[in-house]
Amino acid sequence: MKRKLPVDAETVESFCRKWKITEFTVFGSTLRDDFGPQSDIDVMVSFAPDAEWSLWDHFSMKEELERLLKRSVDLLTRRSLEQSPNWIRRKAIFESGRTIYDKR
């Protein structure tokens, strides 16, 4: 996999610590050859058990990540994906995603 994230590992780790993220995984076009200048970055995260974020917090987290990555971000949680009735999407993301940060 070519490195396509415009930030270093320390920046991702700092972001994850701040937001109590235990897993940060990218998926979608970020990992494929069709990733281009207009592509968004698809991210799936898991949170520590003591992370109790509101909807507003999730919005703020997404905005901060977009500023860091200088791209639009599609942010979803592992929990929401696990509970999704769309098993095809769930399977595709779990099989193709690449974990960048993992402190589970």
Image (cartoon, rainbow, N blue to C red):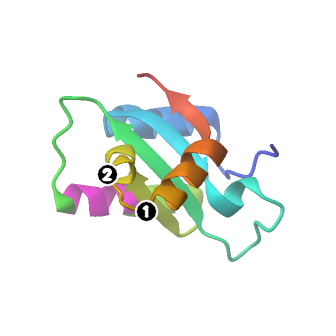
Expressed as whole percent of the image width and height from the top left, the position of residue 70 reads 58, 64
Residue 64 visible to an observer of this rendering: no
Quarter of the figure that contains the N terminus = top right
90 to the left or right of 32: left
In the structure shown, which secondary structural element does the residue marked by tag 2 occupy?
A: loop
Q: Which residue is mark 2?
A: 83
The Cα–Cα distance between marks 2 and 1, rounded to whole angstroms, is: 9 Å
Identify the residue shown where x is 44% and y is 22%: 103
Task: Determine contact: label 2, label 1, CB under 8 Å.
Answer: no
Please identify the residue farthest to the top as the structure is shown: 104
Quarter of the figure that contains the C terminus = top left
| Residue 38 sits in quarter | bottom right
69 to the left or right of 17: right
Callout 1, which amino acid? Answer: Asn
Q: Is residue 74 above or below residue 92?
A: below
Looking at the picture, tell me which residue is in the foreground, 2 or 66: 2
Secondary structure that dominates the magenta span: helix
Q: Is residue 54 magenta?
A: no
Expressed as whole percent of the image width and height from the top left, the position of residue 89 reads 52, 60
* Image mark for residue 77: none
Looking at the picture, tell me which residue is in the foreground, 18 or 30: 30
83 to the left or right of 55: right
Q: Which residue is mark 1?
A: 86
Identify the residue shown where x is 53% and y is 59%: 88
Magenta residue span: 56-62
Expressed as whole percent of the image width and height from the top left, the position of residue 24 reads 49, 39
Expressed as whole percent of the image width and height from the top left, the position of residue 60 reads 30, 60
76 to the left or right of 12: left
Identify the residue shown where x is 50% and y is 64%: 73
Callout 2, which amino acid? Answer: Gln
